[in-house]
Image (cartoon, rainbow, N blue to C red):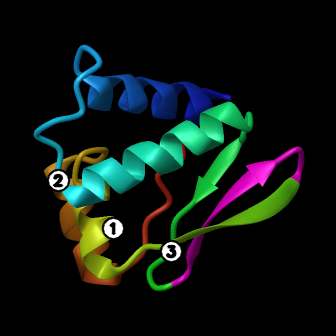
Amino acid sequence: MTCYYRLVALSKHYLKEGNLTGMSETQDIFYEVLQKGIEENASDWHIKENTPIALRIAGEMVQLDVTADKNFIKEIIGEMISPSQMEKYLEIGDMDVSY
């Protein structure tokens, strides 16, 4: 459940006092993905390059109609990990950012 609370915190970060202006298109899409997971009580968000984003809801994987490309992942993950973690991600192309 720690992952859930971290993503809720990120969602609140994006709200910025209820105003979504100033967000990039990627941030806007990610916010919607976070909100969908929160509304559906998802336990996990699975984001993999060039595949539909999936949520684990009640133990079942549910694919969304959003596909994350490399730029989407780089922008979003950059907000959640340290610069050294980003360097490792860019080097090996994979990272488990469980919270």
What is the crowding at mark 1: few (fewer than 14 residues within 10 Å), some, or many (at least 20)?
some
Left or right, residue 47 beside residue 15: right
Residue 17: image location, x then y, percent: 24, 14
Amino acid type, label 2: Ser
Quarter of the figure with the N terminus: top right
Compared with residue 90, is residue 13 higher up or lower down, i.e. above or below? above
Residue linked to disc 3: 48
Q: Main secondary structure of the magenta part?
A: strand
Residue 81: image location, x then y, percent: 28, 48
Left or right, residue 70 beside residue 98: left
- Label 3 element class: loop
What is the crowding at mark 3: few (fewer than 14 residues within 10 Å), some, or many (at least 20)?
some
Residue at position x 31%, y 44% in the image: 80
- Label 1 element class: helix
- Disc 1 versus disc 3: distance between alpha carbons? 8 Å
Q: How many marks?
A: 3
Residue linked to disc 1: 73
Amino acid type, label 1: Ile
Residue at position x 46%, y 85% in the image: 50
Residue at position x 30%, y 68% in the image: 72
Q: Are marks 1 and 3 in contact (CB under 8 Å)?
A: no
Left or right, residue 57 beside residue 98: right
Q: Nearer the viewer, mark 2 or mark 3?
A: 2
Q: Which residues are magenta?
A: 51-59
Q: Are marks 2 and 3 in contact (CB under 8 Å)?
A: no
**Mark 2 / mark 3, whichever is N-terminal:** 2
- Disc 2 versus disc 3: distance between alpha carbons? 20 Å
Residue 30: image location, x then y, percent: 39, 51
Query: Where on the picture, by quarter, is residue 85?
Result: bottom left
